[in-house]
Amino acid sequence: MVYMHRINIVLAVILIIIMTGCKIRQPDTAVLSECSRGMIDYFLHENNDDMFTENTILVLDCMFDEIYVSMNICCLDTTISKPYGRYNGRVHYKGHEILLFGYAWNDFFWTCDTIYNIPHTLSDNFGMFYDPIEWDICIKCEDTTIVETNSEFPYYLSCPISYKEYSGVLCDSLQKIIRKF
């Protein structure tokens, strides 16, 4: 009897150690569109996987008016900065946690049931310069063409072509992704 009690205690301790050592994954509360998955795949392909750490997430933030919709894809280190604004939920995709903000633009980017506001809170590192890797993609609402002059991408000095050429290549590729879906 005492032997079984000790085994149960040991098993309980092992279970507690395993459970505390595992990162609990929160469930998805949204679904990405095929178009968004294609754009995220391209973002991940173009940017180095070394930028991702345990505290890094992807944030998609969409804004629109009657003429343009703007999709911002950002690789955010949550120890430095926290996302805020009109929160639409979370998705896990290819091993990355993705938080969705802004507007899904008639389900063009994602579908979700969760929408609420996350207030802006200042980081402990306020005043520290932090420039995360991000793409700002501007799309015309009427025909879903990418507006290259309003889109912004990081440019690396080691890139063998000019920023204008690099930006043009990215916009052309993103336009093909959008047209595909």
Image: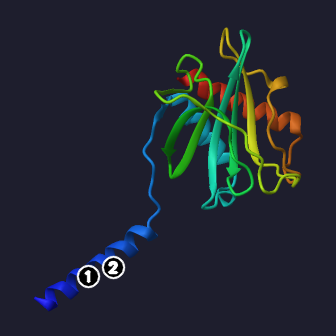
- Residue 181 appears left or right of 15: right
- Residue 117 appears left or right of 30: right
The picture places residue 13, in percent across and down from the top left corner, at 33, 79
Residue at the location (50% across, 41% down)?
Answer: 91
Q: Residue furthest bottom?
A: 3
Camera-side residue of 103 and 87: 87
Residue at which label 1 appears: 9
The picture places residue 132, in percent across and down from the top left corner, at 77, 48
Camera-side residue of 25 and 171: 25
Residue at the location (86% across, 54% down)?
Answer: 158
Colour scheme used in the picture? rainbow
Residue at which label 2 appears: 13
Point out the image quarter for the N terminus. bottom left
Amino acid found under the numbered disc labelled 1:
Ile
Mark 1 touches mark 2? (CB < 8 Å)? yes
- Residue 103 appears left or right of 33: right
Q: How many marks?
A: 2
Q: Tag 1: Cα neighbours inside 10 Å, few (<14), some, or many (≥20)? A: few
177 versus 1 height, above or below = above
Q: Tag 2: Cα neighbours inside 10 Å, few (<14), some, or many (≥20)? A: few
Camera-side residue of 131 and 21: 21
The picture places residue 6, in percent across and down from the top left corner, at 22, 87
